């Protein structure tokens, strides 16, 4: 496991002063030329990891391939390899998959995938995992990529052709639990070309059946929020690039779609009796849930513009997430159908367009002084509609943000100091609208809200020698509450958008200190942080109706993280990571912070142990175990109509993966839940508003076989 550190990118017309020490998570000063330097790109320029104050994990292509051999799920990859990431839901929805008790900003090649204005928790499925070459995980609040990174940044970076000539790659994958209709089938073709221009074309399709738990019973189907079971997914990705002199122009197009097959329907469980939610053959009402994502990005770089490196990115993304049909209380309207008989399904639509400009100038005026400056512009229009009756649930939210930023970094021998600022200026426009009948058909006057917020950063790294380094950092992140969740629930007359204080921005500051070491025998990094927001955003769910609302209360999260590896022999690697998170909030505004953050916001303490053996030049095997600690929180606490009490019985899961390369291709085998343990997932156990429809067991033992050949 690579060590961690935090990334920052800074803002406008600001110059910064700094003080303190700082360190990188995976790399120390190159005192030993045999040690590989790790470079991170999410800092608005390529930057060696040992010169960035903070906590970052770089997940490599080999690690991604190993983990997706165990489970074809990027959230499962993060759950194992990113210490502060909460356990995977194993569903299409990602509710509860938090980071450091907060929300992470998801990026794909720098293009934001998250939809903070109406967070439908579907942003985690936007591309075929086979496309991902590496993942950069920046832990903690950050302004490096703009809005939404109150818990960190996760940047998924697509593959790029490396070898001259034209190469083809075919991949086949099959997964089974030995039951009927449970199989995973995957096929993919990739074309890579590098010459006068470079090109990457990927076409992939994945079919998933419905699995079983450790007791051999069918897993529950999340028919409303969305499930990856009983589904099919397809991805078409094209990347074209051309270098001319010191410049490069690159175009990327991605079209991804995942939708349910509609061959199975959910069977309610019984939480009180310990009966799990299940599934049976049948056709649920309405259309199957789906994700439909289309992204276009044009990138231009110039490696010698006025003595510095310039980059410009223009992007456009259309995102649509359709949820399953239900006769939810919220959807009822007696003007359309008798009470309790109206079935509808919602759809979140988010269309983004943006521009990112940056310029990095080293040795500005004096040796060692570097300036990074630029400008981000984002236009996001998000809405939520009821697809079957064509009703508006959340009106179009027209959000425009402009953010200049500037950062200074000075390197003096073993010390690197950096600081900067970013000016977030945003406008939210909403036309007049009327809420659903459940909210009394309340007329809400449209209006405009504007936000202007300085977001600052300060930190330093001190490379102590002998592979040791340390860091101290202070980073602020900027976000907004779930605006759609606020506006769709207005039920009081004479309200207007510009008077709803719930729309005030969330500003999170993260203070962190860390220590790292890297040498021939391995590496490790450890950090402790304190993250605070005076006006945080917490979702409280009505225990009777299941309807959520946003409460603006302070949030404080403290924690520590550790990751490291040890090489007792050239062909053996032992690794470990640990994350401890302690989040607190208030029951109501202006009350003490005596409520522990629940599963929607915070994961349990997590320990991951692994051993990897390279038994041949092209053969590897990895055995790993993940331990999630039990939690019993907020016992007896009730706030209004929301029950805050949660209980989670921890569990340990083991996985195995092996690959072997031959002249006929690379073969792989993965076994998830090696000992076929019966367990109920973290979120399914803990969710205080849990119903009989979401009491899900986790997957039992699953065998996956893969074959991949390049020619």
Image: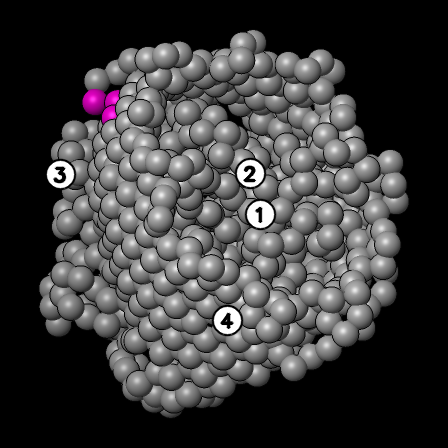
- How much space separates mark 1 and mark 3, taking CA atoms? 39 Å
Residues under numbered marks 2 and 3 in contact, where contact means CB atoms less than 8 Å apart: no
**First along the sequence among labels 2 and 3:** 2
Report the front residue among 385 and 255.
Answer: 255
- Which residue in the structure is indicated by mark 3? 283
Q: Which residue is mark 1?
A: 137
Which range of residues does the magenta coloring cover?
Answer: 181-185
> Which residue has dot 4 on it?
357
CA neighbours of label 1 inside 10 A, class few (<14), some (14 to 19), many (20+): many
- Reply above or below: 570 against 578: above
User: Dot 2 corresponds to which residue?
Assistant: 59
| Image vertical order of residue 679 relative to residue 443, above or below | above
Query: As drawn, is 276 to the left or to the right of 104?
Result: left
Helix, strand or loop at disc 1? Answer: strand
- Camera-nearest residue between 365 and 391: 365
Residue 220 in which image quadrant: top left
- For the C terminus, the image quarter is top left
Q: Position of residue 423 (x, y in %)?
A: 60, 79
For the stretch drawn in magenta, the main secondary structure is loop
Residue 418 vs residue 285: left or right? right
């Amino acid at each position: 496991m690579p060590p961690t550190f935090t990334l920052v990118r800074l803002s406008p017309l600001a110059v910064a002063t700094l003080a303190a020490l700082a360190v990188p998570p995976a790399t120390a000063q190159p005192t030993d030329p045999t040690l590989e330097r790790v470079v991170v790109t999410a800092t608005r320029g390529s930057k060696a990891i040992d010169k960035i104050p903070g906590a970052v994990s770089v997940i490599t292509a080999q690690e991604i391939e190993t983990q997706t051999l165990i489970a074809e799920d990027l959230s499962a990859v993060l759950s194992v390899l990113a210490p502060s990431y909460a356990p995977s839901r194993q569903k299409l929805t990602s509710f509860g998959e938090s980071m450091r008790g907060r929300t992470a900003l998801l990026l794909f090649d720098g293009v934001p995938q998250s939809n903070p204005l109406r967070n439908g928790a579907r942003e985690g499925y936007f591309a075929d995992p086979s496309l991902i070459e590496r993942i950069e995980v920046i832990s903690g609040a950050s302004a490096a990529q703009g809005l939404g990174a109150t818990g960190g940044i996760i940047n998924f970076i697509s593959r790029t052709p490396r070898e001259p000539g034209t190469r083809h790659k075919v991949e086949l994958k099959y997964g089974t639990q030995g039951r009927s209709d449970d199989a995973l089938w995957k096929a993919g073709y990739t074309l890579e070309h590098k010459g006068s221009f470079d090109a990457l074309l990927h076409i992939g399709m994945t079919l998933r059946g419905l699995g079983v738990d450790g007791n051999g019973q069918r897993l529950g189907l999340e028919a409303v929020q969305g499930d990856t079971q009983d589904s099919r997914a397809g991805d078409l990705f094209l990347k074209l690039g051309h270098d001319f002199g010191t410049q490069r122009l690159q175009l990327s197009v991605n079209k991804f779609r995942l939708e349910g097959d509609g061959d199975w329907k959910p069977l309610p469980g019984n939480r009180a009796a310990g009966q799990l939610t299940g599934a049976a053959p049948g056709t649920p009402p309405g259309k199957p849930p789906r994700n439909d994502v289309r992204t276009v990005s044009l990138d231009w770089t110039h490696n010698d513009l006025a003595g510095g490196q310039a980059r410009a990115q223009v992007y456009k993304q259309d995102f649509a997430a359709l949820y399953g049909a239900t006769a939810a209380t919220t959807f009822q309207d007696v003007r359309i159908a008798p009470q309790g008989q109206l079935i509808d399904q919602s759809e979140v639509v988010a269309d983004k367009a943006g521009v990112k400009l940056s310029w990095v100038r080293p040795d500005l005026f004096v040796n060692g002084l570097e300036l990074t400056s630029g400008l981000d512009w984002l236009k996001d229009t998000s809405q939520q509609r009821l697809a079957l009756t064509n009703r508006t649930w959340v009106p179009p939210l027209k959000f425009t943000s402009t953010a200049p930023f500037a950062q200074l970094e000075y390197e003096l021998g073993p010390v690197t100091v950096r600081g900067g600022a970013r000016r977030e200026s945003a406008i939210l426009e909403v036309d007049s609208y009327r809420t659903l009948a459940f909210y009394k058909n309340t007329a809400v006057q449209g209006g405009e809200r504007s936000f202007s917020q300085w977001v600052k950063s300060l930190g330093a790294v001190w490379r102590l020698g002998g592979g040791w380094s340390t860091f101290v950092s202070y980073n602020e992140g900027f976000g907004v509450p779930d605006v759609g969740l606020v506006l769709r629930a207005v039920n009081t007359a004479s309200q207007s958008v510009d008077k709803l204080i719930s729309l005030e921005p969330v500003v999170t500051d993260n203070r962190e200190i860390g220590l790292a070491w890297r040498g021939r025998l391995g590496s490790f990094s450890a950090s402790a942080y304190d993250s605070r927001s005076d006006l945080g955003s917490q979702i409280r769910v009505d225990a009777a109706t299941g309807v959520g609302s946003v409460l603006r209360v302070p949030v404080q999260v403290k924690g520590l993280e550790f990751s490291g590896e040890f090489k007792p022999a050239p062909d053996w690697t032992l690794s470990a990571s640990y994350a401890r998170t302690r989040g607190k909030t208030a029951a109501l505004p202006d009350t003490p912070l005596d409520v522990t953050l629940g599963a929607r916001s915070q994961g349990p303490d997590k320990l991951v142990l692994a051993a990897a053996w390279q038994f041949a030049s092209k053969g590897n095997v990895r055995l790993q175990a993940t331990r999630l600690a039990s939690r019993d929180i907020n016992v007896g606490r009730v706030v209004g109509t929301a029950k805050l009490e949660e209980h989670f019985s921890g569990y340990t899961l083991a996985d195995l993966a092996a690959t072997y390369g031959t002249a006929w291709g690379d073969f792989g085998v993965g076994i998830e839940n090696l000992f076929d343990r019966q367990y109920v997932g973290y979120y399914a156990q803990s969710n205080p508003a849990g119903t009989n429809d979401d009491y899900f067991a986790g997957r039992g033992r699953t065998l996956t076989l893969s074959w991949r050949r390049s020619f």
